[in-house]
Image (tube, grey):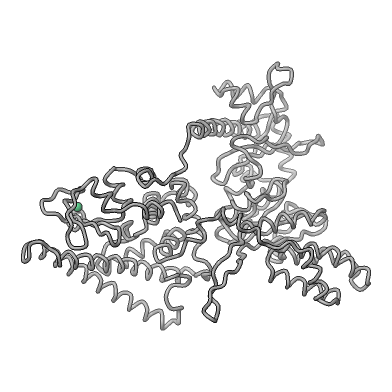
């Protein structure tokens, strides 16, 4: 259960509102003088059944306990969350003093690193000494646009240059040290620059802030590359080089291509192949995959053709795949039972490069070949089948035995039983051996999944989150913000207001919608950053969209969204009419003004409802003629 749900469950809206407003029982509901506008007769109503409130007077707004406290206490969502959590006795992870100090340190370090990046870049562009690196880049065919896009730089071949410069700029020595830019001398006699006489490649986080550097030697000196050390802002295992520039393309194309080196990324982006990121020399980590999974669930890895130790790679990949995606979901069976099955929705493939080539070279010499290689990327296990059998003589008994010996461990790493069975079949056919013998072998050694419980704990929100109408509309809008305009036009044609936060009954959805509306200039990551971290899991799931829904083209997406929004408004108006009926029924003064006003309101809501149902009917006729799928694809009603 989300914290917000837990709070709502523990608190009674009548009790919360009563601590600010004097409420009087009226039938099943409660009424009082609206705290948000001046009035003499009460038109502010609290509905215990739906745990909501509505003002039928001048403000005409309403909501749940969260919106009430936000307005009443003049708080943002985070503030209301704090207040209500306290009231409900639900603990929010409080940020401690130490966390705040850490935040400040990180902010300072980011500034130092950012300044260093500008300094290096300026040296590359303008210094005489920078000529060595300029000619090196020219020889690697890296153009001017790429140099400025990635803010490439040059570190002087000097022991003090950067340290001195940053101190002159007013940065504290301990911050420069903590940012990994200088190194303390062992004898305590001072410090020296970490990067000297090298090409500098700034490494940015996914939001585009510089957090560290990769530095390449310009001659034969070793090591060829040095990186920033681990610092409070730089953790190599959680960052992917180029993601800040690649994330848009990854999202659009639904595919992230992962390469090994900086140069591969530079060359890809230079050729408008923008969905490419680098793992910076290490094996891909789970944290990196999780980060990428925010943008796409399909990955393609470009590994060296002669890469050894593929079994280790496979093991780490399959493990990552399992922790990332293997969750158990209920599936209805034909007999009406519910069965729980594991679902894999991450797709990791391997790109096979021609012998002795790297992505940098392929893209530079033949971009069309690159596209073809990506297109032909193989699922991991198929890749190993191909790689291993291509080295063996599959006609000889010795070759077959060797294939079994090497492929069985690979097959045993597969967590999903159905997939595993498929590959055992494939192997059996390949070596012309009885499947059952192989199966027995797999069964004795196969390490199968029961240990998933622990891993699933980490994704608590996933299983509880159902895609309802609200989530569907919100998700569609986040992904296609330009549709808001046509949606609002349709609503206005019907004679009602455009979509507003009030249309969302769920406090979290309401908050995400409101923040989104306020920040239309921001990209999705900017918006995410604006949101309370408590809302991040929901936000990520909204961006993913409903499970199993087919991708929609622009036209269908627009239709589905408009229909969804019309239904959303319909639902809200119906609820209001129902609430007004209750109010009319227990109005204190029969024949008095109040009842009449309520009656007028009901009439206006009814006419709006009529307009909406007309619009929906017209749309469904259009939809039927085009044989569009009925209702909204992927929507759990
Ligand atoms: Zn009011």
**Is 100 rendered above or below residue 266?**
above
Q: Of residues 387 and 15, which is closer to you in this image?
A: 15
Quarter of the picture holding the C terminus: bottom left
Would you identify the image quadrant in which residue 51 lies? bottom left
Residue 472 image point, x, y percent = 43, 65
Residue 608 image point, x, y percent = 24, 69
Question: Could you tell whether 620 is left or right of 193 in the image?
Answer: left
Residue in the image at 70% along x and 16% along y: 189
Residue in the image at 46% along x and 56% along y: 1
Question: Could you tell whether 114 is left or right of 310 in the image?
Answer: left
Residue 413 image point, x, y percent = 74, 61
Question: Could you tell whether 214 is left or right of 19 in the image?
Answer: right
Q: Of residues 299 and 115, which is closer to you in this image?
A: 299
Residue 81 image point, x, y percent = 38, 46
Q: Of residues 203 and 104, which is closer to you in this image?
A: 104
Question: Could you tell whether 551 is left or right of 299 in the image?
Answer: left
Decide if residue 348 is in sight here: yes
**Is 172 rendered above or below residue 498?**
above
Residue in the image at 52% along x and 69% along y: 551
In this view, the residue farthest toward the bottom is: 625
**Is 581 rendered above or below residue 25?**
below
In this view, the residue farthest toward the top is: 189
**Is 378 rendered above or below residue 148?**
below
Q: How many marks?
A: 0
Decide if residue 369 is in sight here: no
């Amino acid at each position: 259960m989300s914290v917000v749900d837990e709070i709502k469950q523990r608190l009674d809206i009548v009790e919360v509102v009563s601590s600010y407003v004097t409420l009087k029982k009226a039938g099943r509901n409660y009424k009082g003088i609206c705290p948000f506008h001046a009035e003499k007769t009460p038109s502010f109503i609290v509905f215990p059944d739906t745990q909501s409130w509505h003002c039928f007077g001048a403000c005409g707004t309403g909501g749940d306990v969260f919106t009430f406290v936000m307005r009443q206490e003049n708080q943002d969502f985070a503030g209301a969350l704090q207040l209500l959590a306290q009231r409900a006795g639900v603990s929010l992870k409080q940020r401690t003093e130490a966390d705040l100090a850490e935040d400040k340190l990180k902010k300072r370090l980011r500034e130092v690193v950012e300044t260093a990046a500008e300094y290096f870049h300026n040296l590359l562009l303008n210094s005489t000494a920078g000529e060595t690196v300029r000619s090196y880049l020219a020889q690697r065919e890296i153009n001017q646009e790429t140099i400025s896009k990635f803010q490439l730089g040059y570190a002087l071949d000097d022991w003090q240059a950067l340290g001195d410069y940053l101190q002159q700029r007013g940065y504290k020595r301990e911050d420069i040290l903590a940012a990994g830019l200088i190194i303390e001398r062992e004898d305590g006699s001072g410090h020296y620059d970490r990067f000297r006489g090298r090409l500098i490649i700034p490494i940015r986080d996914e939001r585009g802030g510089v957090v560290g550097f990769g530095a390449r030697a310009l001659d034969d000196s070793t090591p060829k590359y040095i990186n920033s050390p681990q610092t409070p802002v730089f953790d190599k295992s959680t960052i992917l080089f180029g993601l800040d520039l690649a994330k848009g393309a990854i999202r659009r194309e639904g595919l992230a291509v992962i390469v090994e080196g900086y140069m591969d990324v530079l060359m890809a982006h230079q050729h408008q192949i923008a969905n490419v990121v680098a793992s910076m020399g290490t094996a891909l980590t789970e944290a990196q995959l999780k980060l990428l999974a925010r943008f796409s669930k399909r990955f393609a890895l470009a590994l060296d053709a002669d890469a050894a130790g593929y079994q280790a790679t496979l093991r780490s990949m399959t493990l990552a795949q399992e922790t990332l995606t293997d969750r158990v979901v209920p599936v209805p069976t034909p007999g009406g039972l519910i069965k729980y099955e594991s679902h894999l929705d991450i797709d990791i493939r391997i790109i096979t490069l021609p012998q002795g080539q790297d992505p940098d070279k392929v893209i530079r010499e033949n971009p069309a070949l690159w596209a073809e290689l990506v297109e032909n990327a193989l699922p991991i296990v198929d890749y190993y089948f191909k790689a291993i059998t291509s080295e063996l003589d599959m006609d000889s008994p010795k070759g077959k035995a060797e294939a079994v010996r090497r492929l069985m461990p690979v097959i045993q790493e597969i967590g999903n039983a159905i997939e595993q069975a498929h590959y055992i079949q494939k192997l059996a056919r390949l070596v012309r051996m009885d499947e059952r013998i192989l199966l027995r072998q797999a069964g004795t050694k196969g390490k199968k999944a029961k240990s998933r419980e622990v891993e699933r704990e980490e994704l608590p929100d996933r299983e509880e989150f159902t895609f309802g109408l609200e989530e569907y509309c919100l998700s569609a809008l986040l992904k296609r913000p330009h549709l808001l305009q046509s949606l609002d036009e349709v609503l206005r044609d019907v004679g009602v207001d455009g979509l507003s936060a009030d249309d969302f009954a769920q406090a979290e959805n309401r908050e995400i919608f409101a923040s989104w509306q306020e920040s239309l200039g921001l990209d999705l990551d900017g918006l995410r950053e604006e949101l309370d971290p408590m809302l991040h899991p929901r936000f990520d799931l909204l961006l993913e969209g409903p499970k199993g829904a087919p991708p929609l083209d622009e036209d269908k997406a627009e239709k589905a969204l408009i229909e969804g929004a019309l239904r959303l408004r319909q639902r809200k108006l119906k609820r209001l009419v129902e609430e007004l009926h209750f109010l009319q029924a227990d109005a204190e003064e029969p024949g008095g003004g109040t009842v009449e006003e309520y009656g007028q309101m009901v009439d206006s809501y009814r006419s709006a409802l009529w307009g909406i149902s007309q619009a929906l009917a017209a749309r469904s006729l259009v939809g039927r003629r085009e044989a569009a799928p009925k209702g909204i694809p992927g929507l759990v009603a």
